[in-house]
Image (cartoon, rainbow, N blue to C red):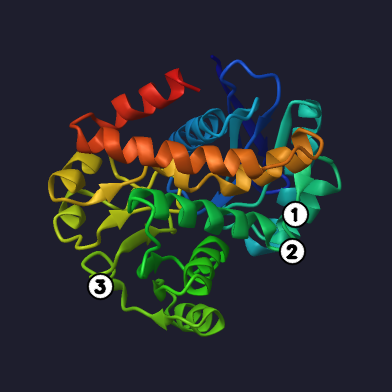
Amino acid sequence: MGVEVVPLQDQAAGLDAVLVFDDGGQPVCAGGTRTHAYAHAAAALDDARALARAMRLKNALAGLPVGGAKIVVRTPAPSTRAAAFGALGQKLAPFAGRLHTAGDLGTTPADLRAMQQHFEAVHVDDDGSLARAVGETVWRCAVAALDGHAPGSVAVQGAGDIGGAVLARFVRAGAAGHVCDLDESRAREVARAAGGHALDGAGFYPAPVDVLSPCARGGLLDDARARVVRARAVVGGANNMLSHPAVARALVDRGVRVVPDPLSSSGAVIVGACRHVLDGVDPAPHFARVADLAAQAVSGLQRGRTLDEVLAALLAGA
């Protein structure tokens, strides 16, 4: 298993980014490109490392022979944004055949197309299929967490592409759907489009729903917030949804079922890897595998295992 850090900087173009490979012994790695106003380079690197690890776990748990990778970009100035992402594509060119990337939080289709001019293995989700795939794995893992029963209600945090797709998947299956976002107008728009309801952000964690689904930035579900959760299960579309692994134990001790997010948020990498890395392999068995492992993970946590112990056991059986 190898972790490799690659700084990606071009001062003239306004690019300040980092690429992390966490390959798990695999020759080809996949992971998205995230853009955020990180306070400093160390914060960007820490996030890239954590996200690359999450991608490695997702791929391994889904049974994909693909390693993990992540690119994080410190948000460039609007006047240099196109140049910065063009320069990023040029910096990625030496990794042709080893790296595949797509969008992630904060990165727009225009950013990806600027990269794509110089690096072919940038995949733009023009049809929303990757976001819908995350909606599917969140749904399947939620059903698994509830002993095979369809959830009757969900609260989603984050009204971006992933949160919108998760909300739409639950509503389409007949669940009452609620969504919140820092941008309240965006939450109302996504709720209307899906046939759900906008939720005030303060009401998210204590929402009395079957499933609580964090789909915004990672690390937001901490000890204090865990103490007010009233949902039957937490099943997220976000990477690294817990502020630290012991939050899972705090939730389980209160009777809340928890699906590790490397399982529930894996839909995009499953579809992307099957489509672009594995030459059109059918993703269906990998979706089924993730749901089966979700049920095992919930059971393991309920039996007193830690989150890290559960993930290690699932990987050992992979």
Residue 303: percent from left, percent from top:
20, 33
Q: Which quadrant would residue 196 be assigned to in this image? A: bottom left
Residue 4: percent from left, percent from top:
58, 21
- Density class for disc 3 (Cα within 10 Å; few <14, some 14-19, many ≥20) is few
In the depicted view, which residue is nearer to us: 202 or 174? 174
- Name the kind of residue labelled 1 in the image: Val
Label 1 or label 3, whichever comes before in sequence order: 1
Quickly name the residue at label 3. 202
Quickly name the residue at label 1. 124
Residue 216: percent from left, percent from top:
43, 59
**Dot 3: what SS?**
helix
Label 3 or label 2, whichever comes before in sequence order: 2
79 lies above or below 33: below
Instruction: Write the residue at 41% across / 26% down.
Output: 314
In the depicted view, which residue is nearer to us: 144 or 15? 144
The quadrant in which the N terminus is found is: top right
Cα–Cα span, label 2 and label 1 = 9 Å
**Dot 1: what SS?**
loop
189 lies above or below 228: below
64 left or right, relative to 294: right
In the depicted view, which residue is nearer to us: 94 or 149? 149
